Amino acid sequence: MHPHTTLRYINDVVGYGVFATQKIPKGTITWALDDLDQHYDESYVNALEPLRRDLVIKYSYRDEQGRYVLCWDLARYVNHSFHPSCIATPYQFELACRDIYPGEELTDDYGYLNLDYPFYCQSEVGCDRTVVLPDDILQYYPQWDAIATESFRYFNQVEQPLKHLIQPQYRFKVEAVAAGTAPMDSILTCYYDRNRRNKPLTQTTCSNTN
């Protein structure tokens, strides 16, 4: 996570969340995958006893290959919002999609995290959605692509303390996208096709917490 963040208890319903300690300008990398994050195949997670399995699923997201990615840092505590302050990109990092001010929470739309099960949320003003579905990315990717593309316009104008964590295979493309010489790839490339699963999905009820 961005170094200017901290973990803070919110309340008994939401639990903990990640908050900015200094201003994080729009276009700043707020999170990037790094070599301390852990990757687990679905078969491994399914073989765990229920307690550890449920915790891995709760605090992980799934990549386009269906692997569970368990972040080692504060990223696992980033809460959901339908009006998120951060946006995913196809390059294994997220950007601030607006200025995030000191004391403001960093949030994601869980729709781009390839959740295993429907995630029922607290209602939010100005949004008709009350549930995140595993295939939301198929519906909302044009909107999220537009937000990420707009955020990239500020990439070279702000400090990037996490830039060194960009994976080598993406560095040239990220530089081109940030410079405006190449279009951003679609966030749809992050989608995990859930039709590969052998077991049906069941519904769960959750608060806006990881």
Image: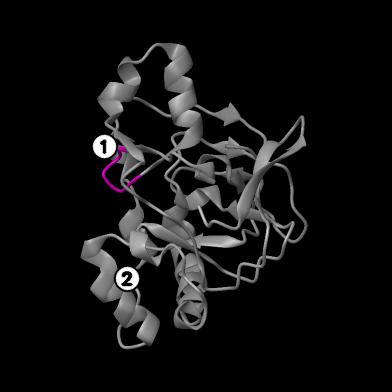
Please give the residue where the numbered disc 1 appears in the rendered image.
196
80 w.r.t. 178: above or below: above
**Residue at 33%, 40% in the rendered image:** 194
Magenta region:
63-67
**Residue at 24%, 75% in the rendered image:** 172
10 Å neighbourhood of mark 2: few (<14), some, or many (≥20)? Answer: some
Q: Is residue 185 left or right of residue 8?
A: left
**Residue 88, magenta (yes or no):** no
The amino acid sitting under disc 1 is Arg
Picture quadrant of residue 89: bottom left
Is residue 191 visible in this depiction of the protein? Answer: yes
Looking at the picture, tell me which residue is in the foreground, 165 or 91: 165
Looking at the picture, tell me which residue is in the foreground, 76 or 123: 76
**Residue at 64%, 48% in the rendered image:** 6
**In terms of secondary structure, where does tag 2 sit?**
loop
**In terms of secondary structure, where does tag 1 sit?**
helix
The amino acid sitting under disc 2 is Asp
From the top left corner, tell me how far across and down residue 178 is, in percent.
39, 80
The answer to whether mark 1 and mark 2 are in CB contact below 8 A is no
Q: Is residue 122 left or right of residue 82?
A: right
- What colour scheme governs how the chains and residues are painted in the rendered image of this protein? one colour
**Residue 66, magenta (yes or no):** yes
Instruction: Say which mark, if any, is on residue 185.
Output: 2
Instruction: Say which mark, if any, is on residue 53.
Output: none
From the top left corner, tell me how far across and down residue 169 is, in percent.
21, 63
Is residue 91 visible in this depiction of the protein? Answer: no
From the top left corner, tell me how far across and down residue 71 is, in percent.
43, 40
Secondary structure character of the magenta stretch overall: loop
From the top left corner, tell me how far across and down residue 115 is, in percent.
46, 40
Picture quarter with the C terminus: top right
